[in-house]
């Protein structure tokens, strides 16, 4: 186990996907992880998630193919977001990059619309 709860949870989701499971149980969670999962749920990569005691239970969506945390967390300006879209996403309109900005977590599309840069956290496709 590492210190990065988001990276650990996204790795567990990928391991469950490869094993053919639809439900993932993560023992460590945080508000930051819940915010990342909320964006995944908004874009239909995650069906749902709920806290059960101290553990977090997630259901993988049908649209989900891959997810990963970005390490190191690059700080990007608005004009440089396109470079990271080409680096991490397989196609132009496929997938979403989660960016932490001064206004909270948001997708790369929203960050470009609001003209806000930030730190790249994770991506889903």
Image: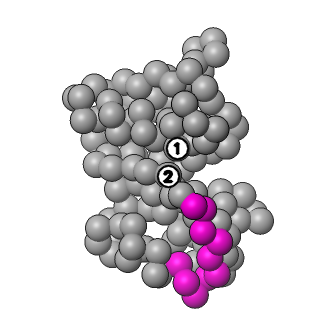
| Residue found 33% across the figure and 34% down from its top | 15
Q: Is residue 9 magenta?
A: no
Q: Earlier in the sequence, mark 2 or mark 1?
A: 1
> Where residue 3 appears, x then y in whole percent?
64, 38
* Residue at (28% x, 48% y) in the render: 65
Callout 2–callout 1 Cβ contact below 8 Å: yes
Q: Which residue is mark 2?
A: 69
Q: What are the residue bounds of the magenta stretch?
A: 72-81
Q: Is residue 30 left or right of residue 27?
A: right
Q: Nearer the viewer, residue 96 or 4?
A: 4
Q: Can residue 71 be spotted in the picture?
A: yes
Q: Residue at x 34, y 71 (%)?
A: 93
Question: Residue 10 location, x and y as percent?
Answer: 46, 41
Q: Residues within 10 Å of mark 2 (few under 14, many from 20)?
A: many
Residue extending farthest bottom: 79
Position of residue 116 relative to residue 22, above or below, is below
Instruction: Locate the N terminus by quadrant.
Output: top right
Numbered mark located on residue 59 in the image? none
Which residue is tagged 1?
A: 7
Q: Is residue 10 above or below residue 106?
A: above
Front-most of 62 and 121?
Answer: 121
Residue 50 is at least partly visible in this image: no
Taking 45 as reference, is 6 left or right?
Answer: right
Answer above or below: position of 102 versus 65.
below
On screen, residue 82 above or below 119: below
Q: CA distance from mark 2 to mark 1?
A: 5 Å
Q: Residue furthest top?
A: 53
Q: Position of residue 45 (x, y in %)?
A: 39, 46
- For the C terminus, give its image quadrant: bottom left
Q: Is residue 14 left or right of residue 28?
A: left
Name the element at disc 1. helix
């Amino acid at each position: 186990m590492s210190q990065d709860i988001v990276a650990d949870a996204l790795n567990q989701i990928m391991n469950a996907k490869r094993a053919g499971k639809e439900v993932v149980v993560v023992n460590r969670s945080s508000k930051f992880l819940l915010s990342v999962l909320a964006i995944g749920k908004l874009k239909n990569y995650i069906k749902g998630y709920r806290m059960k005691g101290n553990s977090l239970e997630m259901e993988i969506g049908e649209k989900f193919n891959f997810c990963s945390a970005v390490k190191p967390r690059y700080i990007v300006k608005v004009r440089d977001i396109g470079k990271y879209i080409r680096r991490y996403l397989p196609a132009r309109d496929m997938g979403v990059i989660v960016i932490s900005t001064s206004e909270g977590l948001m997708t790369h599309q929203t960050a470009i619309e609001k003209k806000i840069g930030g730190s790249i956290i994770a991506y889903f496709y």
